[in-house]
């Protein structure tokens, strides 16, 4: 996949993010990696308004920005640092899903409750509130990025990673649905969560392994 295809794919998933109300207004930022560069959403744009040639090209090792006339997202350091410490990451999706944010206002650890969450996401980590757009947030996120593919940012939102945009995006959907399910159940009584043994059992299913592999390969 060349840079042109990457830019077009970013546009597709940016539109899905907005359509599914995972961000509002000019919130959130996403990126994908290709050939030593990342392509990141420009600052100040609603994600669904970005055209293919407006994604900002940034050299991952040096941090040098290709001159496109647009500033990269203010969370550029969070993306850069993550790609630098984990070469397996191919895409990063940072959104402000309402149920995820609501969850961080009252809880920290999101338990694993159902098979899709266990198979497609696994554990979700939590980082307490840090001032957005700063190197402090980037440092706090990168400290846990190798431990989980999804990280809740207290009072802020969610960051997911994947080998490609498809995987990172669907992890975002699953974590938001997980937060929603937890909050609904918690309003009634203490939710029943999967035990460690049940989680491992799901993760070991051949059918789930195939589905995860397919998700990683498909764009």
Image (spheres, rainbow, N blue to C red):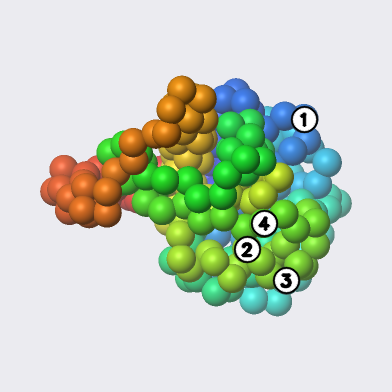
How far apart in space, not on screen, are marks 1 and 3 (Cα)?
27 Å
How far apart in space, not on screen, are marks 2 and 4 (Cα)?
10 Å
Q: Position of residue 83 (x, y in %)?
A: 57, 67
38 sits to left or right of 56: left
How far apart in space, not on screen, are marks 3 and 2 (Cα)?
18 Å
SS at mark 1 in the image: loop
Q: Tell me if residue 158 comes above or below residue 148 in the rendering.
A: above
Marks 4 and 3, the one that precedes in the sequence: 3
Classify mark 3: residues with Cα within 10 Å, few (<14), some (14-19) or many (20+): some
Q: Is residue 191 visible from the viewing direction of this image?
A: yes
Marks 2 and 4, the one that precedes in the sequence: 4
Give the residue number, with chain letter if any, for mark 2. 141
Marks 1 and 3, the one that precedes in the sequence: 1
Give the residue number, with chain letter if any, for mark 1. 25
- Name, please, the residue furthest toward the right: 69
Give the residue number, with chain letter if any, for mark 4. 128
Marks 1 and 4, the one that precedes in the sequence: 1
Q: Contact (CB < 8 A) between labels 4 and 3?
A: no
How far apart in space, not on screen, are marks 1 and 4 (Cα)?
24 Å
């Amino acid at each position: 996949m060349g840079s042109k295809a990457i830019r077009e794919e970013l546009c597709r998933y940016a539109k899905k993010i907005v359509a599914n109300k995972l961000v509002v207004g000019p919130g959130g930022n996403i990126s994908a990696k290709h050939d030593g560069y990342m392509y990141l959403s420009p600052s100040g744009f609603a994600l669904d308004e970005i055209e293919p040639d407006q994604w900002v090209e940034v050299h991952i090792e040096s941090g040098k920005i290709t001159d496109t006339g647009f500033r990269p997202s203010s969370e550029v350091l969070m993306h850069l640092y993550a790609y630098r410490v984990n070469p397996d990451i191919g895409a990063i999706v940072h959104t402000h899903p309402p149920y995820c944010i609501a969850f961080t206002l009252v809880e920290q650890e999101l338990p694993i409750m159902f098979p899709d969450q266990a198979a497609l996401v696994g554990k979700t980590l939590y980082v307490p509130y840090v001032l957005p757009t700063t190197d402090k947030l980037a440092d706090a996120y990168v400290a846990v990025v190798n431990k989980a593919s999804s990280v809740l940012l207290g009072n802020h939102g969610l960051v997911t990673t994947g080998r490609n945009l498809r995987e990172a995006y669907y992890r975002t959907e699953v974590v938001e649905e997980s937060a929603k399910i937890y909050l609904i159940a918690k309003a009634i009584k203490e939710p029943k969560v999967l035990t460690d043994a049940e989680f491992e059992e799901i993760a070991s299913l051949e059918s789930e392994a195939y589905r995860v592999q397919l998700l990683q390969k498909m764009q």
